[in-house]
Amino acid sequence: MPTARALRHASTRALRAAIVDGHPVDPAALEGWVYRGTSLGLPRLLERLSWKTFQKTFWRDPATGRLLGWNVRLEQDGVDAPSRPRTRRGRPVTEWHYEVIAPTGVPTPPGFDRGLIIDYGLGRVPDLRMQRIKDPLVALTPGSADELIGVSYLVVGGRCLETPTYFTLERERRITETPYDAPRVGPLALSATERAWAEALFAAILGTDGADGLPPFAAIDRATFWRSFDGAAAPLVRAGLRPMLHTLVFLPVVRGYLRPFFRLDPAEQAAFIAAAADDRRAFVRQAVTTLKTLACLAYFDDPTVRARYPGAGAP
């Protein structure tokens, strides 16, 4: 059988023959691995509109025992370039989730039942656009799961419609995270700009500049705090943070500063926070109290800060 690299310039007929003549794949050999995928068989124009390289994963769900997976979008740096996942909110962009199953009872084109089936209709994150698509997956070398080949076909009314979307998979690395680890933050999550506003308020409230041996707020890991906040804070708290944040950010405009909070110098920020804490309006005072609490949670979430306070333990 040819290697994955040798198939990069193969004809559609040769790619189909590699599927039909391929070898069975042991599902256990796939578990826990990320594979580098290369799209084959499509015209270059279509490849440019979609992708040439990508990643596919194979993950055994400990709760159900199902062998699941997802596609990871890669930056299109070239077929031989290192994999560089495209990210959104600091995490790899994943899509087209699937389950890997045996071909038993699954409609397949003739000769496409020698290996496993990637079934996009059974993924943990449903995508109605993909529910009729299935990919047979076979090994290029007997007894080895290092190099695989697959192709997509559609099942419509029990009939199979083949497509020219072939791909090879080459074993790349172990899975280190899954998209199911990340909390689904939804519309209540602050935008990147709003987080930057909140962090400016946190830094001003804490007043740490590094002179006392503690790290300044800008030097700590804030991303971990925001992941924890989005995943653990009650919806009412998350929903209430946005109006409190916007109040404190833009109140200085009508308080004589004529600029939002993040445009004030450090002395002006400190003076505004002190005045807002004694504001006659309860909502403004509550906003300051809430931001103080969150600032402390974010700051003491950092292990460098906690190390200065023996016995504090984990946050």
Image: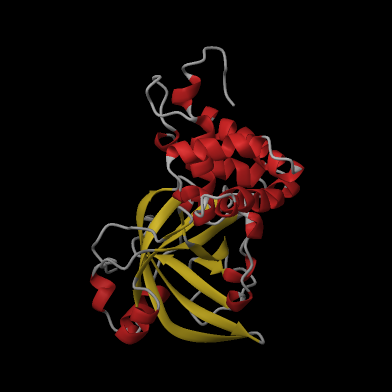
Residue 80 image point, x, y percent: 23, 63
- In the rendered image, the residue lying farthest to the front is 256
* Residue in front for this viewpoint, 313 or 54: 313
- Report if residue 150 is visible in the image: yes
* Residue in front for this viewpoint, 73 or 242: 242
State whether residue 143 is above or below residue 16: above
Give the image quarter of residue 38.
bottom left
Q: In the image, what residue occupies the spot 33% across and 58% down? A: 84
Image mark count: 0
Residue 154 image point, x, y percent: 56, 82
Q: In the image, what residue occupies the spot 52% across and 65% down? A: 95
Q: In the image, what residue occupies the spot 32% across and 58% down? A: 83
Specify whether 235 is left or right of 172. Answer: right
Q: Quadrant of the N terminus?
A: bottom left
* Residue in front for this viewpoint, 267 or 44: 267
Q: Quadrant of the C terminus?
A: top right
Residue 88 image point, x, y percent: 47, 59
State whether residue 8 is above or below residue 109: above
Q: In the image, what residue occupies the spot 69% across and 44% down? A: 284
Specify whether 165 is left or right of 62. Answer: left
Residue 179 image point, x, y percent: 54, 53
Specify whether 237 is left or right of 144. Answer: right
Give the image quarter of residue 55.
bottom left
State whether residue 173 is above or below residue 85: above
- Report if residue 113 is visible in the image: no
Task: Check the image and tell me how it is coloured.
Answer: secondary structure
